[in-house]
Image (tube, rainbow, N blue to C red):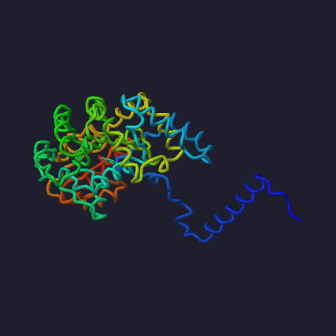
Amino acid sequence: MHKKLSRRMFMQGAAAALSATAAARITAAPSKEMVRPQPIYGPPPGVAKLNANENPYGPSPAALKAMMEASQKGAYYVYDSVMRLKSMIAERHGVTPDHVALGSGSSAGLTAAAIVAGREGNILGPDLFWDTTSRVVEIQNLGKIKRLPKLDSLAIDLDAMYSAIDDSVSMVQVTNPNNPTGMLINPVKMREFCLKASKKCTVLADEAYNELTDSSDANTVIPLVKEGHDIIVARTFSKIYGLAGMRVGYLIAQPEKIEQMQRFGIGWYGLNQAGLAAAIACYEDHRFMDFCRGKVKEAREMVASAVKENGLSALPSVTNFMFVNLGDLNAETFRQEMEKEGVLIRGIYRDYTNWSRVSMGHLEDVEKYTSALPKVLHRMS
Ligand SMILES: Cc1ncc(COP(=O)(O)O)c(C=O)c1O
């Protein structure tokens, strides 16, 4: 005889099946795993994760609350929440919602921008920048990434960049502040460069860390988009908002450009209800952002003094990471030695073999870095 399968019975059955599977797994698992299960949503307890420029002070309380609510409506597609966030962003920057595209992190938009540019020519960038998404043009044989020569200061030379824009270049990419250097370009120079360069090709300004600078509004080129120039600005909820795992980012550009890029992986279908809810809840949460900026500054001061005390130097960062000059030490060996101390940092970038990037996490994690530093340097000397 068939019983009517109620939702409650279904849930009970599912729970029983789950616990049976879990029990089987526990019986089969090695005892070590039973004692210390590895978390899958963040670093294991005791490990200082300072390798991905995340902001562990997020999500903000308002974002958490909104996510809980939105997850209960996870059965529904996201159209209305996309429209809401787009209008908030448009209003904040004085552009129309047609100037805004949302994506799964800013990576989605940056990849779309690179594909559109790659179909028309090469992408020009400094020697060192966050090129993870733009590399898609080389992977897909669309175009090349042309790089400026390396400078001793590791700064971006905008004059050299302007001179290097030839007919083969369809887009010039400036990460400001730059990753992994953490350095900011003078806002007047950046504005002048964007005005000139956007007459020759598209300018992509990746402003992932903009809100971590002391003056977010002075350091953005979004007003130039509003004035009608061919500039794409990329922003993200992954950094100051502490929502890297919720995957929300956006582009601001001319509506025709947005339309072109929307053919390559950005648009509402890449987003999720919880991420959008979190972004909507914290977009204008200035108290939370001030709090995070304060913590990041404190952390940078701790790293700067530790670096100095240990005879090293670091670039002047305005972001939640620092690029440390290890002298004649190898950054990959340094990374491995730090990992043995429970501190995760980045290894070598390109041929910058003695430069090491460390992110500003919780202060107690940054303290782990500063106390491990003399030990590791001693071992490596
Ligand atoms: C400069 C820069 N841009 C963009 C991104 C991509 O971040 P997301 O896709 O999480 O927005 C990162 C990530 O670290 C970054 O450093």
Horizontally, residue 365 falls left or right of residue 182, namely right
Q: Quadrant of the C terminus?
A: bottom left
Q: Is residue 381 visible?
A: no
Would you place residue 235 above or below residue 13 in this image?
A: above
Residue situated furthest front in the rendering:
256
Give me the residue at 68% from left, 61% from top. 19
Residue 243, horizontal then vertical, whole percent? 44, 43
To which quarter of the image does residue 2 belong? bottom right
Give me the residue at 42% from left, 47% from top. 103
Nearest the eye: 139 or 40: 139
Give me the residue at 39% from left, 31% from top. 291
Residue situated furthest right in the rendering:
1
Nearest the eye: 116 or 333: 116
Q: Quadrant of the N terminus?
A: bottom right
Would you place residue 93 above or below residue 158 in this image?
A: above
Give me the residue at 10% from left, 46% from top. 163
Residue 107, horizontal then vertical, whole percent? 37, 50
Residue 336, horizontal then vertical, whole percent? 30, 61
Q: How many marks?
A: 0
Q: Is residue 278 visible?
A: yes
Residue 174, horizontal then vertical, whole percent? 23, 45
To which quarter of the image does residue 361 belong? top left
Nearest the eye: 214 or 221: 221
To which quarter of the image does residue 86 belong? top left
